Amino acid sequence: MVRRAILEVLDENRPMVVEPVAGSSSKLSKKGGSRAEQSPLPLSKQYDSAKAEVLRSLNDTFDSFMDVAHVRCAKLLNHRSEQNARLSLAGFHSLYMLIHQFITQYESLGGKMCFGLRGTLTAQAKAFLGNFHTEKSRQIQVLIENEQWAQAEVPIDFQNLVNQVVDAAFASKNGTSDESKSPLLLNGDASQPAAVASAASFANSPLALGFQQAEGLLTRNASMGTSKTPIVLSPESPLSARSMDPAVAMLARHDSDAASIRSADTAGIGLMHIGDQAFHVVGCSLVLVKSVVEYLQCAVNIPMLATDVLQRLVEVLKSFNSRTCQVVLGAGAMRSAGLKNISAKHLALASESLSLCIELIPHVKECLRHVMSASQEVLLAQLGRAASDFTNHQSELHRKLVTIMTDRADYHARMLGATKWDDLDEAAQPPVAAMDGLVKEVRKLHKVLKRYLPPSSLRAVFAQIFAMYEEKLSDFYAKMRITSGEGKRQLMLNSQYLLRRLRALDPSLPVDWELEVVVNNIDLVKPYQVAASPAPAKGSESSIESRTPETGSEGD
């Protein structure tokens, strides 16, 4: 603007000539005559040379000034590199947008790239992402190790986070995505300054729930399942808006107002919904969802970090998968969280947490695709491999449930074998104690899994369990020794009772066992009788008696 003003002054004071008028001679005159009598003529060589020199001097001065400004700005950023790396996502985004706007305006005015400051800003962004990744990884690992694997309520704020990801992915996939209106953008009204808009948008978004608030809230929910009230900075606090810098005070007021609004609608919902799917969640899976959304916001709001965000996000997902495997399948939660055992409920909730991740990954993939170039999209295959790892882990959890019931089936088979079927009275009604115990355990497992697993997973697990029971009971029946028709009848009645109760669990579960056929094919075994010793032949006693003295005499 200074350069433009100086050039305007030079143009206003350029030399003018007076056109010849009738009855007068033509002569040079300074500016000041009437407009009708004056007309601009081509500038003199001296004026052209002077203007070019002034323009050159202005350009050099502008470049020198901007170079000094960039160096000072870069030094300030480097001096505060550690503090900047520890900023919140909203805080660093505000800083990033201010510096990026400054660089863009300089490049448009100066006509050249600002490599130095751009490089410094890129380094600061990567340092922030590195620190952000370290904090999130540590937070998730601590929560997994202390997870009690009890169902947690889903705060509405966290459901809103998932809805943002689903909406952004849907818009990107259908080509209706507007970058200025993406649900994952941190800055709000474009007419506001970048820092104020970003802070206001973040304060009014679900992500205003800070790191310490979320960690404390979810830890308390996992351990006690009680308090869900976020921590709000009180006006009387020494760090309240009265003692803050005006800009910081404005941000604090935004956070306080948003927290007050959240306190009215944080009544949790039972399940986490992604599209038409619903999932039971635990505390650590809620934190994972929040972290995934924040990683996506890093990529969407700072596109230069898109590939780095993808790598860090894959690391977080793999770490969650492996740590969950260690504490559940590996029974590590018995040491780290103090669980007495790993029950079917724990396995089911772990499976649901994995299902949540499997369902969320395609939406995450689509959001990242939108901010990546065509050549970078090949890197998204890493998310597909992470989803495959989750699926394999989930299959292992389901097989563990089958293994538990296999051990119980062996126990009940031994109890059935110890039952004295032939001694049962004709009036005895099924079930016997062993068969009743078998039915109760299967029904109890079905009741637990039905509460937590979706119908498709429930049917898949019980199809394996029923196939295992049919095979074991059929083999065991074939080896049973029943001596009476009543014993065989009692075994048939108990087998029919078993099939009837299992079919009542769920009509969609196939129970086409052939136990009745196996029982009918059992061959009765004749009762075992001690054979009578044959009568001694005549003369045998005398012969023995005659030999006895001889044996005695030899011994003497």
Image (cartoon, grey):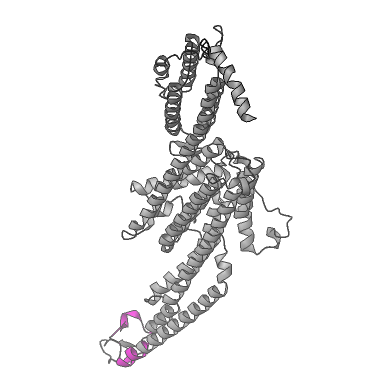
Query: Which residue does the image show at 60% across and 29% down from the upper left?
Result: 554
The quadrant of the rendering that contains the C terminus is top right
**Residue 503: image location, x then y, percent:** 45, 20
Instruction: Name the one closer to the observer, 259 or 532.
Output: 532
Whole-percent x and y of residue 480? Answer: 47, 20
Res 543 seen here: yes
- The answer to which of 225 and 62 lies nearer the viewer is 225
Q: Position of residue 219 (x, y in %)?
A: 63, 47
Q: Is residue 375 above or below residue 36?
A: above
- Vertical arrangement, residue 95 with respect to residue 13, above or below: above
Image quarter (top left, top right, bottom left or bottom right) of the N terminus? bottom left
In percent of width and height, residue 414 lies at 53, 26
Q: How many marks?
A: 0
Residue 303 in the magenta stretch? The answer is no
Q: For this view, does 337 lie left or right of residue 10? A: right
In this rendering, would 141 be left or right of 338?
A: left
Against 393, residue 466 (above or below) is: above
Q: In the image, is 20 to the left or to the right of 401? A: left
Residue 44 part of the magenta segment: yes
Report the residue that reaches farthest toward the top.
427
Visible residue check, residue 168:
no
- The image quarter containing residue 428 is top right
State the image quarter where residue 429 is shown.
top right
Q: Nearer the viewer, residue 192 or 163?
A: 163
Quarter holding residue 131: bottom right
Q: Residue drawn at (26%, 89%), measured in percent from left and top?
A: 23
Which residue occupies 40% across, 18% down?
Answer: 518
Viewer-nearest residue: 369 or 430: 430
Give the magenta part as a residue range: 26-51
